[in-house]
Each structure stands twice: as structure tokens, then as C-alpha cells.
Image (cartoon, rainbow, N blue to C red):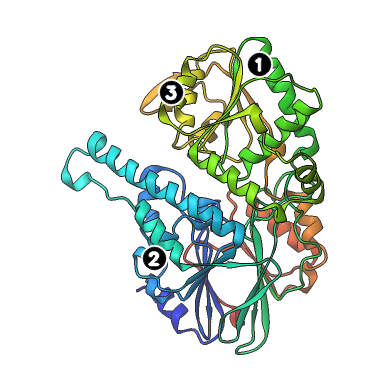
């Protein structure tokens, strides 16, 4: 155990230990030490270069047996994806999350376990040259099922105790179905409040309610900063932009290939396609969702209308289907997925993974990027060192399964689909609370993003803004 970890565990005053998503946008995990125990805020998988991911994901900032509970902000795999490994390594406590997050996590973690198993088999049979180079799955589908026994559903705005003198409340974050920012209230050794944003959403986005407004005034803020350095396109323009891309690609006989996260982004795209069809902006055409996980996630979206905003709730009550009804075909079998390669007619294909690092999207890219008539439509953030980022950078060649393919297809970026708050959203959210903060910690951002958030908070009146590195430990009574 390192000196930092030892000091963290022995602290008799609340302290923070930053581990994942510090100066990066993946693998969210921050530990809070209270006089009563250790809480993990999120427990996410690092997603990026394979060799980095294997090493990073097998590490925890301390022995999981020392962690008493986990508070999850939402079900994206970079925020919840390491929970099964935490349990596998000896965690015995509870994992708290909203009801929709628990339902989504159940399918997300099982899918992640399947990917871990398949990746290990592929590596060991195709790439490993010696026994020493072989790898084991981080966790399996069965490990994911066991981990779900630790989950406990919490309603929005319901205050619950997770230790002696420690309680929390989940507040609407508006990022994905079930997402929440977490208000933590401690009474020992003295009263204090902490707000952990998880990933904050945007205002006036489709389907979901807006982030809670105003945010509660707190002593300490732990905020994401993914898009703190830029403004998104207006989300209300995305329906028209998507219709334009579909119509232009269809006119030349091509396919629209959309790499899309299974949770949130897929449903938003389907929702806009549904509206475009109803409004006559596009004529009916085949739309395929080629992902078992996306299919299951869409079913969970249908189960949780309590998360819908007013407009979507009314549409749901009046029309029932929000995600394409009979116009969209959900593909689950491998055979049906492969059959899409031989379709000559124009169509739209949504497939996971969102950053193009695994899954069926790789096959659709491999089979379609070499033809000019096709369009690859990027609708989400692409982290560094991912295939998705190389697409966004408009590389002339892209490597898929070890082979280079010339990038001949048209590339379209629809930044307005992002579910992350941008600079204007942060200004709106933090203006009422910044001046009352004792300190703010900026996480979940890379490059200029955390610096932009720091500047924003300074401008709004928060004097003490810290951008921690992974491994930094801060006692809250020893802040400057």
C-alpha cells in the first residue's frame, strides 16, 4: 500500500482520492473517505488503447475490501463497468443507483463481461505467441450477474443513508436514462456537503428531463468537464441535419453508417428519425439497429417513462412508440447482421460500439468505408487513441482488425447529439452556486477541457479550483 493510500485510509477528516477520469474522460472513479468508511463515486472501465486498458483496469487505488459502498451516477460503461471486477476482488458492500440505472447496468455489465471473455479468447488464440502473453478476462458474464446482487435501487430525490452520519440524494442530471448527480451530506466531524456531477446533461434535449435547476448550494463540487471548452450545435437542428444526411446519401444509393452508444445516443437518433418520418422530412427507408445491447437498452427506455420530459411523455401517451415502431428493425443474430453487408439499397445502420473500438460497427465500417457513396455519421464524443477519433481526424486510411482501409466514404459530424453539458450549460448550472463553493475539483476532461472549466468557475466566483491528477489525495480540511 502506497503512502498516499495509507494516509487516505487513516484520515480522520473527509478526504478525496482521485483515480479514474482525472485529466482523461474515461474510467470514472473517485474515492471519498469519511470518518465512517470509504465510498467510491462511480467505478468505471478505462476505454482506450488495448495495452493501456488491460493494465489500468486491473488496478484499484486501494484494496476493494476497504471500500464500503459505491454510488453510481449512471450506467455508461466508463462509469459502472468495473463493478463486477470490484466484487470479484472482494468488495462486499452495496452499489446504489437509480432504478433505470440498475436496469441498464444489468444488461451493460453482462455485455461487458461477454466482450471481456471474447477479447481474451481472440487474443490468446490469434495474437499471443507464448503462454506468458495470454490474458484472462477481467470478468465474465457470470461475474456480472453476481455483481448485480449488490445493487440497490434509489428513487430520484430520495435521501438515503449509506453510513453513520452520511447520506445522499440522487438528482436529475439529464445525461442518459437514469443519470444523476449525487448530493452527499456528511455530519461528522462537522456538517459539509459535496456534489458529484457524474456526467451532466444538456437543456432541451429529446426524451429526457433537463438537469435539475437550480443546483443545491454545496461546500465542494466534483464536476465533469468533457465539453467545457466548446459550444454544441443546437439540439433542435439535429433532426433536420440527420434528415439532410439521409436524403443526400440515399440520392446516390449509399448507406448511412452511424456508430452509436447503445444507451442514450441510439435512442436519440431513433427518436429524431421517427419525428422526421412523421413530419415528411424523409421518406420511409430501412433502418437497422444492429446491436443486441442497443435492442435491450431500447426496451428499458420503454420501461421508464418516469424519466421522460413533458413533450416526450405526451408523445408516448398519444402514440406509444418513440423509437421507430415497425419502421425500425432490431438485429440481434450474427446471421442477420452479416446479411446487411449484401444489401444494395439505401438504408441506415446504427451499431455499437460508440467509439468504434469493438462490436459490430467494426464490420460495417470495414465493409462500407471504401465506397464514396456511403456516409459515416459521427454522433458522439470520440476519446483519444480510439478508431472513432481517427475517423473524426479524417485519416486517409484506418486500421480495422489489423488491416488498413482507404477512407473513401463521406464523413459527417453531428455534434449536437452530444448528451454532455457544454460551456453555456455549465455557465447556467454553476452561476448560482460557484461563489459559495469552498473548492471545486475538475475531472472527466482531457487537454484544454479541465482548464476551460477552471476558468469558468473562477469567472463565476469560485476561487479555489483544483484539477487533480490520478493518484492525488486531498484532505478537505487542508485545502489552501
Tag 3 near tag 1, CB within 8 Å: no
Residue drawn at (58%, 57%) of the image:
101
Whether residue 478 sits left or right of residue 38 in the image: it is right
- N-terminal-most mark, 3 or 2: 2
Label 2 packing within 10 angstroms: few (<14), some (14-19), many (20+): many
Q: Is residue 441 above or below residue 365?
A: below
The residue shown at (79%, 70%) is: 435
With 462 as the anchor, is 144 left or right in this view?
left
Give the quarter of the figure containing the C terminus: bottom right
x and y, in percent, of residue 18 in the image: 51, 66
Looking at marks 1 and 2 on the same chain, the residue that comes earlier in the sequence is marked by: 2
Image quarter of residue 218:
bottom right
Residue at the disc numbered 2 = 87
Q: Is the residue 380 above or below the residue 326 in the image?
A: below
* Residue closest to the far left: 131
Report the residue marked by disc 3: 338
Please identify the residue farthest to the bottom as the structure is shown.
189
Residue at figure coordinates x 66%, y 16% from the top left: 249
Amino acid at each position: 500500500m502506497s503512502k498516499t493510500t495509507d494516509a487516505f485510509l487513516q484520515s480522520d477528516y473527509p478526504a478525496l482520492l482521485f483515480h479514474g477520469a482525472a485529466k482523461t474522460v474515461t474510467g470514472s472513479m473517485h474515492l471519498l473517505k469519511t470518518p465512517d468508511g470509504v465510498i467510491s463515486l462511480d467505478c468505471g472501465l478505462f476505454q482506450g488503447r488495448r495495452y493501456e486498458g488491460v493494465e489500468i483496469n486491473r488496478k484499484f487505488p486501494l484494496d476493494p475490501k476497504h471500500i464500503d459502498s459505491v454510488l453510481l451516477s449512471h450506467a455508461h460503461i466508463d462509469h459502472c463497468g468495473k463493478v463486477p471486477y470490484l466484487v470479484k476482488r472482494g468488495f462486499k458492500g452495496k452499489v446504489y443507483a437509480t432504478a433505470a440505472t440498475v436496469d441498464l447496468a444489468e444488461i451493460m455489465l453482462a455485455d461487458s463481461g461477454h466482450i471481456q471473455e471474447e477479447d481474451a479468447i481472440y487474443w490468446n488464440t490469434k495474437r499471443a505467441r507464448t503462454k506468458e502473453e495470454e490474458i484472462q478476462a477481467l470478468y465474465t458474464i457470470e461475474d456480472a450477474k453476481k455483481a448485480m446482487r449488490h445493487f440497490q435501487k434509489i428513487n430520484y430525490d430520495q435521501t438515503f443513508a449509506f453510513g453513520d452520519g452520511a447520506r445522499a440524494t440522487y438528482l436529475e442530471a439529464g445525461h442518459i436514462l437514469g443519470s444523476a448527480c449525487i448530493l452527499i451530506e456528511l455530519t461528522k466531524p462537522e456538517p459539509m456537503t459535496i456534489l458529484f456531477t457524474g456526467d451532466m446533461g444538456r437543456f432541451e434535449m429529446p426524451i429526457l428531463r433537463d438537469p435539475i435547476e437550480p443546483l443545491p448550494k454545496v461546500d465542494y463540487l466534483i464536476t465533469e468537464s468533457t465539453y467545457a471548452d466548446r459550444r454544441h450545435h443546437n439540439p433542435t437542428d439535429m433532426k433536420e441535419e440527420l434528415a439532410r444526411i439521409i436524403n443526400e446519401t440515399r440520392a446516390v444509393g449509399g448507406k448511412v453508417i452511424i456508430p452509436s452508444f447503445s444507451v442514450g445516443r441510439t435512442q436519440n437518433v431513433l427518436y429524431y428519425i421517427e419525428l422526421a418520418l412523421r413530419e415528411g422530412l424523409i421518406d420511409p427507408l430501412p433502418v437497422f439497429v444492429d446491436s443486441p445491447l442497443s435492442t435491450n437498452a431500447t426496451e428499458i427506455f420503454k420501461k421508464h417513462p418516469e424519466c421522460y420530459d413533458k413533450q416526450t411523455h405526451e408523445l408516448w401517451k398519444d402514440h406509444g412508440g418513440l423509437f421507430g415502431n415497425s419502421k425500425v428493425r432490431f438485429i440481434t443474430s450474427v446471421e442477420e447482421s452479416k446479411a446487411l453487408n449484401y444489401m444494395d439499397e439505401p438504408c441506415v445502420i446504427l451499431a455499437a460500439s460508440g467509439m468504434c473500438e469493438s462490436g459490430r460497427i467494426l464490420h460495417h465500417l470495414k465493409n462500407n468505408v471504401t465506397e464514396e457513396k456511403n456516409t459515416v455519421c459521427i454522433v458522439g464524443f470520440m476519446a483519444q487513441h480510439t478508431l472513432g477519433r481517427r475517423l473524426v481526424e479524417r485519416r486517409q486510411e484506418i486500421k480495422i482488425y489489423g488491416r488498413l482501409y482507404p477512407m473513401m466514404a463521406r464523413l459527417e459530424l453531428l455534434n449536437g447529439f452530444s448528451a454532455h453539458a457544454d460551456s453555456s450549460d455549465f455557465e447556467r448550472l454553476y452561476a448560482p452556486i460557484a461563489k459559495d463553493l469552498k473548492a471545486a475539483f475538475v475531472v472527466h476532461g482531457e487537454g484544454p477541457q479541465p482548464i476551460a472549466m477552471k476558468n469558468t468557475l473562477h469567472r463565476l466566483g469560485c476561487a479555489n479550483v483544483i484539477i487533480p491528477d490520478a493518484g492525488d489525495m486531498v484532505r478537505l480540511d487542508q485545502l489552501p
